[in-house]
Amino acid sequence: MSKMMIVGSMLGAAAITALGAVATNYTSSKNNQPQWVEIVSSKALTETSSEPQQQCTTKKIAKTAPVQDQHEIAGTVIGAVVGGVLGNQVGGGSGKKLATVAGAAAGGYAGKQVQEDMQQKDVSYQEQQVCKTVQKTVEKTIGYEVRYLHDGELKTTQVSQKPSGRMLLQDGKLMTVEPVSS
């Protein structure tokens, strides 16, 4: 091999190495520079969970009033008096006495029944709030799957904020920043 050929080969190798280094430096510096990319589509990524929740309703509750006269004595006495007076109006002589006693007995029984019925119907209504815990299904957005074009290639990534029409790509990561329009 001639001396010229060796020097030429060495210069050629040096030139190729230098051009390769410049191209590599250009490519890596191009990747480090932020670039705007067009968003093709985005889809919300959701997570479903259940949370306890109080559910309350108002109900009317019937309450029987407390009984003052449990043995219905007042009704029996009033009924016996009225029955006796009415029985006394019937007949004469000893029949009158028998009618008065029978009227008092029947009136006493009727008065007791009337008082018992009235006490059972003595009802008051109160509104009461009734609550129970139920499980409510909740869906939360946890991020977004984004498809974008970069150097003619369709790529997919996930971001935490909802993307808009364009996003900034730097070091292979999308940044959710809108450009300032002039």
Image (cartoon, rainbow, N blue to C red):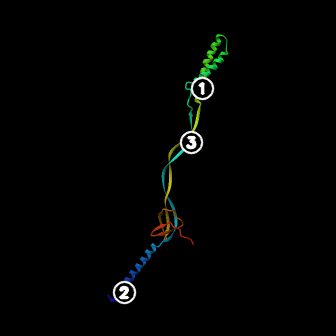
Image vertical order of residue 19 relative to residue 60, above or below: below
Label 3: which secondary element: strand
Label 1: which secondary element: helix
Query: How far apart are labels 1 and 2 at the CA level?
Result: 131 Å
User: Could you say which disc has been placed on residue 8 in the image?
Assistant: 2
Few, some or many C-alpha atoms within 10 Å of disc 1 (few <14, some 14-19, many ≥20)? many
Query: Residue 160, position in %: x, y?
Result: 48, 62
| In the displayed structure image, the side of residue 121 where residue 134 appears, left or right | left
Residue type, mark 3 in image: Thr
User: Could you say which disc has been placed on residue 149 in the image?
Assistant: none
User: Could you say which disc has been placed on residue 115 in the image?
Assistant: 1
Q: Earlier in the sequence, mark 3 or mark 2?
A: 2
Label 2: which secondary element: helix
For the C terminus, the image quarter is: bottom right
Query: What residue is shown at x 52% (from left), y 43% (from top)?
Result: 131
Residue type, mark 2 in image: Gly
Q: Quadrant of residue 1?
A: bottom left
Residue with the mark numbered 3? 58
Query: What residue is shown at x 66% (from left), y 10% (from top)?
Result: 93
Q: Residue furthest top?
A: 93
Query: How far apart are labels 1 and 3 at the CA level?
Result: 33 Å
Q: Earlier in the sequence, mark 1 or mark 2?
A: 2
Query: Residue 53, position in %: x, y?
Result: 51, 48
Q: Quadrant of residue 5?
A: bottom left
- Pick the residue in front: 157 or 121: 121
Q: Earlier in the sequence, mark 1 or mark 3?
A: 3
Few, some or many C-alpha atoms within 10 Å of disc 3 (few <14, some 14-19, many ≥20)? few
Query: What residue is shown at x 62% (from left), y 13% (from top)?
Result: 98
